[in-house]
Image (cartoon, rainbow, N blue to C red):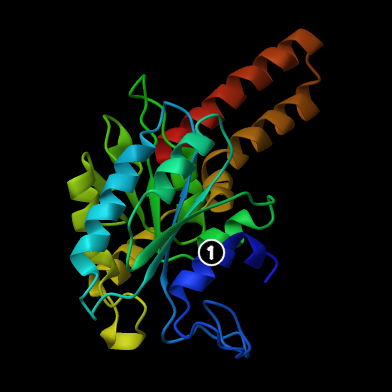
Amino acid sequence: RRLAPQLEAACSKLCPNPGSSAPGTLFTDDKGQLREDRPALVVSSTSWTEDEDFGLLLAAIAEFDSSIADDPAFPKVLFVVTGKGPLKLFYERKMERLSLRKTHVATMWLEPKDYPMLLGSSDLGVCLHTSTSGLDLPMKVVDMFGCGLPVCAVGFDCLGELVRHGENGMVFSFSRELADQFRELLRNCTKSGGEGNTRLNKLRDGVKGFERWHPNWQRNASPTFSAAADFVGRRHPPPWVTCGVLALLLFSALLRLLTSW
């Protein structure tokens, strides 16, 4: 409810019973349970810079919307994009010009405490991050996985170290591929039990296997730092030796953490 003011336009378009005074929200009933006729929720976070081709997502949404407009197997879909940046207004104007029938795109700015709640409440995440070096992994995907959310992500050289296509997410290169993935993953996705989307459920199960930070730290880094503390406590080396040992062990621990993912 705290975020409702930012979703007023979405509510007016996607609400199953416009004008109804029934208690609840766009997604939940008066008891806080998910509505059977709720829209699907797809989330993407961006810094609104030229590093991410947000036009790719808008093109995919437009194609997806036109293909499902008259298909009752698909729920209405709300796409929420979070973040601030220099190109936000530019793309918001593009959104206003979209002629969407069964979907809606909304931009939001969230407090840190609300961001993981949004991710955990969503059906699917989208990552538009591309690496100029081909070596850095998108931390927004780690955030999504940490909240149990499968991801559709733009592919680049090392992305496979994080997103395994068909296991915990889907990888795409073009807007048409992303639109196809939306069709594959969002069909009947709001239905419960065996009536839901088996493909999306499989990806959710794959995300559950993503090791969280704490157990990974306990397994790879904690023993290293414990050994360092034991060495310093027993030997009482000069400060310069202590600093050198700690720096070496820190590098070793971080390397083991990163390579373990």
Amino acid beneath label 1: Ala
In the rendered image, residue 101, in percent from the top left (x then y), is placed at 32, 66
Give the labeled residue for mark 1: 9
Name the residue: 78% across, 15% down: 237
Specify whether residue 163 is in view. Answer: no
Specify whether residue 111 is in view. Answer: yes
Displayed quadrant of residue 175: top left
Q: Could you tell whether 248 is left or right of 138 in the image?
A: right
User: 2 or 132: which is nearer to us?
Assistant: 2
User: 171 or 243: which is nearer to us?
Assistant: 171
Is the residue 89 above or below the residue 148 in the image? above
In the rendered image, residue 75, in percent from the top left (x then y), is placed at 33, 75
Is the residue 241 above or below the residue 157 in the image? above
Name the residue: 43% across, 50% down: 96
Q: Could you tell whether 5 is left or right of 240 in the image?
A: left
Displayed quadrant of residue 77: bottom left
Name the residue: 24% across, 81% down: 72
Other residues around mark 1 within 10 Å, as few (<14) / some (14–19) / many (≥20) = some
In the rendered image, residue 160, in percent from the top left (x then y), is placed at 28, 40
In the rendered image, residue 228, in percent from the top left (x then y), is placed at 68, 29
How many tags in the picture? 1
Which corner quadrant holds the N terminus? Answer: bottom right
Which corner quadrant holds the C terminus? Answer: top left
Dot 1: element: helix
Q: Could you tell whether 229 is left or right of 159 in the image?
A: right
